[in-house]
Image (cartoon, rainbow, N blue to C red):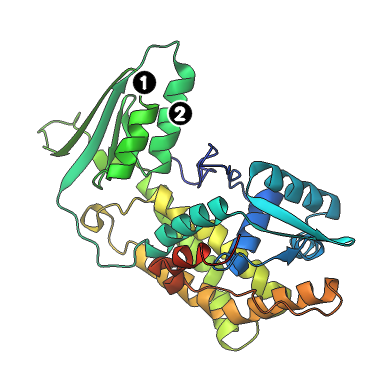
Amino acid sequence: MVRTFDIEEIFPDVPVASVRLPRRQANSPQGLAVTLVADYTMDNRAWLPSAAIVALLGEFGVTSGAARTAISRLARRGVLEGSRRGRHSSYRLTRPAAVNLSAGGAEIAAFAADRESWDGRWTIVAFSMPKEESAQRRALRDDLRWRGYAPLYDGVWVSPRPMTAAARAVLAAVAFGTTSVFRARHLELDTGASRSPVDAWDVAGISAQYRAFIRRWSPLLRRMTAGGVTGAEAVRARTEMMDTYRRFPVLDPLLPVELMPSGWPRARARELFVAVYDGLAEPAQEHIRAVAAHVAGGEQHSRIRAHTVAELRAGALRSTVDVAGA
């Protein structure tokens, strides 16, 4: 059974082209830095002064030393690239990182956006590996978890969604030993030993996380509507909300609503996410620009721009990445 929020790698920590995105651990300096830079520069890969990144991370309680270390490590990972002008340095997303993050952002933005339908079938991945292949087994299990699968039994993982061609290609690369994939319906047995595929998930735990998300952000939505959330608070709230919401597509791979308890809170969580994330876009953007201008001696940074959920979903960010310059 998958326990909620056990999955800290929303993006796999494996090479993707020339970039390795960091583990998305809660409040990690590297994870916060990636979210901050991506949320306000991903569509055009705008440069951010390193001092601005340090100052913004400081508003999250990250020390200046830890912030500089995070920037340096992200540069070594191929996530950020730097530029120096005199004594001042700036950073931006590398092209591979921007493309990867844009694709991930589109998936997050599309999650639970449309009317959900299910054909009543499950995708089943059954595998058997020699005990000595523990590293390969772990890699396969990690990839399946990240893609929204859960273990019904030790070597039998399930998902209500069809397996895409891209997922099949990745599975083929990590599936050592014997692996079979099926798309099939579940047949109930008239016995107490029968187990439904949906039992592979901690449905009550996922519901609790959705409801905790709703409780956390509903009061802020009311304050935001009244214009009471600005500056650093707007940036912190928007970043925290994204880092929390981005986990739901992994925890809940659009489990069929007809199999869920009455009042399943997925739709309400999405409504709240869109309202707050988009509603705080302008005040957060202005604060990021102000911090960048302050550390750069008044130089304006008009290319810093907050994107909306609709822009993320539309994939407009991917189409502009290659136009932004080398």
Q: Does the residue at mark 2 contact the one at mark 1 (Cβ under 8 Å)?
A: no
Q: Which mark is residue 290?
A: none
Whether 156 is drawn above or below 284: the answer is above
Residue 108: which quarter of the image? bottom left
Front residue of 1/111: it is: 111
Mark 2 / mark 1, whichever is N-terminal: 2
Q: Is mark 2 on a helix, strand or loop?
A: helix
Q: Quadrant of the N terminus?
A: top left
Q: Name the residue under label 1.
A: 176
- Vertical placement of residue 162 versus 293, above or below: above
| Location of residue 286 in the rendering, given as x and y in whole percent from the top left corner | 68, 80
Residue at x 85% of width, y 50% of height = 65
The residue lying furthest to the front in this view is 326
Q: Determine the residue positioned at 33% across, 30% down.
A: 172
**Residue 114 spot, x, y in % from top left:** 28, 67
Count residues near mark 1 (Cα–Cα under 10 Å), then give few for <14, some for 14-19, many for 20+: some
Q: Which of 165 and 181 is in front in this view?
A: 165
**Amino acid type shown at disc 1:** Phe
> Label 2: which residue?
139
Secondary structure type for disc 1: loop
**Residue 27, visible in the rendered structure:** no
Identity of the residue drawn at 49% across and 67% down: 320
Residues at marks 2 and 1, CA–CA distance in whole angstroms: 10 Å
